[in-house]
Image: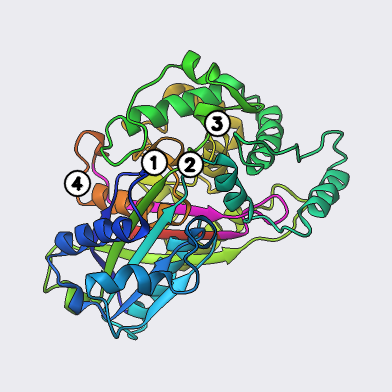
Amino acid sequence: MREVAVVGVGMTRFGKHKETGIKQLVRDAVDEALNDAGMDIKKVQAAYVGNAAAGIMTGQHMIRGQVTLAPLGAIDIPIYNIENACASSSTAFNLAWQAVATGVHDCVLIVGFEKLYDENKRKSFEALESGLDVLDHMAYFQQIERALGSTETIFKEGGANRSRFLDVYAFLAKRFMERYDLTQEHLAMLSVKAHDNGALNPKAQYQARVTIEQVLNSGEISYPLTRMMCAPVGDGGSAAILCSPAVAAQYTSKPVWACSSIVASGRVESDLDNTITRRTSKKLYEMSGIGPEDIDLVELHDTTSSAEIMYLVEMGFCTGEDAAKLIEEGYFALDGALPSNPSGGLTTKGHPVAATGVAQIYEIVTQLRNRAGKRQVSNAKVGMTHNGGGIIGVEPAAMALHLFKR
């Protein structure tokens, strides 16, 4: 297979953009990516468009990619619409990567976008909860509760101020905390770190530093999770351009290489240590020859602060036994040994679902180009993205992982 180069990236600022429609979100992200590459859209041979909730939120089903890209001049080319929950655009990236790596296309565009904010919060949360198995999720939860011998139920009544996904994250967080002696304050430290990074990111939804006390007092969502430990609802767009080495050489002498990409699907699993993140990251390391010890920074799917440390353990960046100490020592801070979510992550940068995967790639590419400004990770050469989507059983229904190097 051929090498695959990233020659352009773009994204909007994530946030509650009440007056901005899906066409404008896509235009802003794609224009930035094209300008970044120094390329005209007519050079693009195919487009892969990730979106999860536009049908529910805006009524636009079926041809979301064509509707949003036609005004930009993307005509006659194949446009693929990809829906895979929060992993939609990172799944689109995987398909685009395969097309370039195998020689099907030499220049492709990947887009992720979501218009998720609505003044009717219940509408937003109903859209998010369509990422569960709507028929059988309760049966799955009960099956796992019985297998674990748990006296606590996973699921609680949903409300207007939170998604029921957070009950699953809270259930897993409590188990992880008990096993490895983490406290709610450790999760608050991760949230503080995320807000520190987000304060340096002009694309982030939240750009203010916070204290541990503010995080702990920000309002309980589902213990041990507080509001500032959870990703907010918002809107956004992201885009990337991939090229073959020969085409990339026409636009840049220093591309970032997308050196490995994998997508996997979850399963109902009562062994909560045998997670999709653990299984899939092992495959990624084996296929790439790059291990966690070789990676300089990671953008991962921290829908909650607890998920961040759980995923770091599952991907082999640290052990559970060391997690509390490493959090306290700032191991995952911008100037730490392994900067995690230098963008601010989902909890601070924001999480417009299908835009998230390519937004993570935007951050890694920006870091590897040494263009991240005040949040720049020193000597960044190899970066990784981790993007999950939906829930099947109690693990992500979809998982997309990518590795990049300069």
In this orientation, does residue 194 appear? yes
The residue that mark 2 highlights is 233
- Dividing the picture into quadrants, the one containing residue 109 is bottom left
Identity, as a three-letter code, of the amino acid under mark 1: Lys
Residue at screen point 43% across, 16% down: 211
Mark 3 falls on what kind of element? helix
- Residue under numbered circle 4: 370
The residue wearing badge 3 is: 323
Instruction: Name the front one of labels 1 and 3.
Output: 1
Residue 389 belongs to magenta span? yes
Q: Quadrant of the C terminus?
A: bottom left
Who comes first in sequence, dot 2 or dot 4? 2
Query: Which residue is denoted by mark 1 in the rendering?
Result: 16
Mark 1–mark 2 distance (CA, rounded to whole Å): 8 Å
Q: Find numbered disc 2 in the image and state the secondary structure of the residue it sits on.
A: loop
* Range of residues picked out in magenta: 379-398
Give the Cα distance between marks 3 and 4: 29 Å
